[in-house]
Image (tube, helix red, strand yellow):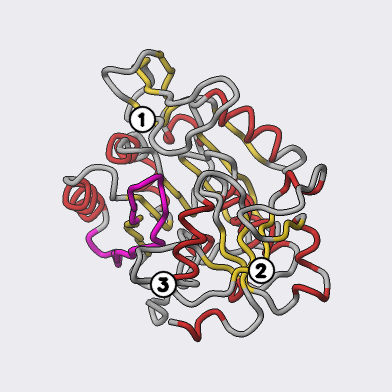
Amino acid sequence: MRGVWGGGGVILYGAGRALPECLELLKKHGGEPIAVCDKRFAKEKPNECLGLQTIAPRELLGAKYKDCNVLISNVAYYEEICSELLTWGISEKRLFLPGFAYRCTNYIHTREYFSEPMLPEKGEVYVDCGMLSGGSVKQFISFCGGDYKKIYGFEPSPNSYKRVIADLQGVERLHVVQKAVWSEETELRFAKLEEEGTFDPGGARIDSQGEEIVCTATIDNTVGADRVTFIKMDVEGAELEALKGAEKVLLRDNPKLAICLYHKPEDIVEITLYLWQLHPENKYFLRHHNYVVSGERYMLDTVLYSLRKHEDLCHI
């Protein structure tokens, strides 16, 4: 594992609560930590952080750090960080996420949903269910070069919705719905898992014990006559109900699908069977994605992908 880091040293991006654990993991796998990077350091830079020098994000573009790898140590916003660094021209080969104690990988989270043969194409109508901070929308736009017909997004969480609107300001042909995507239009209880001034991206969801009430929407009614080509879905266990609310679109358009299966143990069977019954001729495959540090727990994303039978599967 020592060779995976190269010879340029490693910069840890993110000075939050996950930093000490990531630093320990890095050292255990032979990485040489040289600095801690954080957006806050662009305004006020302390002399050091955990004994390491501190740098602002833009300093990563300088000659001094051009050979360094970057280990993302910010759990909440790692997708956004990866997307921004890629936009700046930093190679994804330099970007790493922390994994289990015995493994590190540079197959970073930006490749979830949008990796061969699931790359967005020109002229897509894209539906993003569970937008969180809008990172997957930014990745979609980047992969298709901004050449798309329309983007629909669903995000019921009030704080996440505000952030999406702010972060995606100026994005054209974008329709964001502040509702939970579901099998019918109704009102349901919602566990928000957010507090004023804080943000926990892990688990805000439909929950019969939730203290809030949210309105729901269906994909079928939201997109209307638009011919959908790509649906990404990460909605904390509501995926099957959301798919049922998209049944007309699924039958009519047979779009590419990237559906998370890891929130409920039965989903890997029930969602796969439901989709297969709609389109038994399609090709279905599973991918396990990054190991993600979340407090003291580790999570592994499992995504079901669906492609039309005639589409190229040579890269799976």
Q: Amino acid at mark 2?
A: Ile
Front residue (pair 161, 17): 17
Mark 3 or 1, nearer chain start: 1
Structural distance between the alpha carbons of marks 2 and 1: 47 Å
Please tell me whether the stretch drawn in magenta is mainly helix, strand or loop.
strand
Say what secondary structure mark 1 lies in: loop
Structural distance between the alpha carbons of marks 3 and 1: 29 Å
Q: Which residues are magenta?
A: 280-300
Residue at left offset 16%, top offset 51%:
269
Say what secondary structure mark 3 lies in: loop
Q: Is residue 305 above or below residue 315?
A: above
Q: Position of residue 288 (x, y in %)?
A: 33, 63
Q: Position of residue 137 (x, y in %)?
A: 59, 48
Q: Amino acid at mark 3?
A: Glu
Q: How many marks?
A: 3
Mark 2 or 1, nearer chain start: 2
Dot 3 crowding, Cα within 10 Å, few <14, some 14–19, many 20+: few
- Residue at numbered disc 1: 182
In the image, residue 281 lies in the stretch drawn in magenta: yes
In the image, residue 175 lies in the stretch drawn in magenta: no
- Residue at numbered disc 2: 34
Residue at left offset 69%, top offset 40%:
168
Residue at left offset 37%, top offset 29%:
205
Give residue 311's mark: 3
The nearer-to-camera label among 2 and 1 is 2
Front residue (pair 269, 47): 47
Q: Position of residue 236 (x, y in %)?
A: 35, 38
Q: Is residue 96 above or below residue 209?
A: below
Q: The N terminus lies in which quarter of the figure?
A: bottom left
Structural distance between the alpha carbons of marks 2 and 3: 45 Å
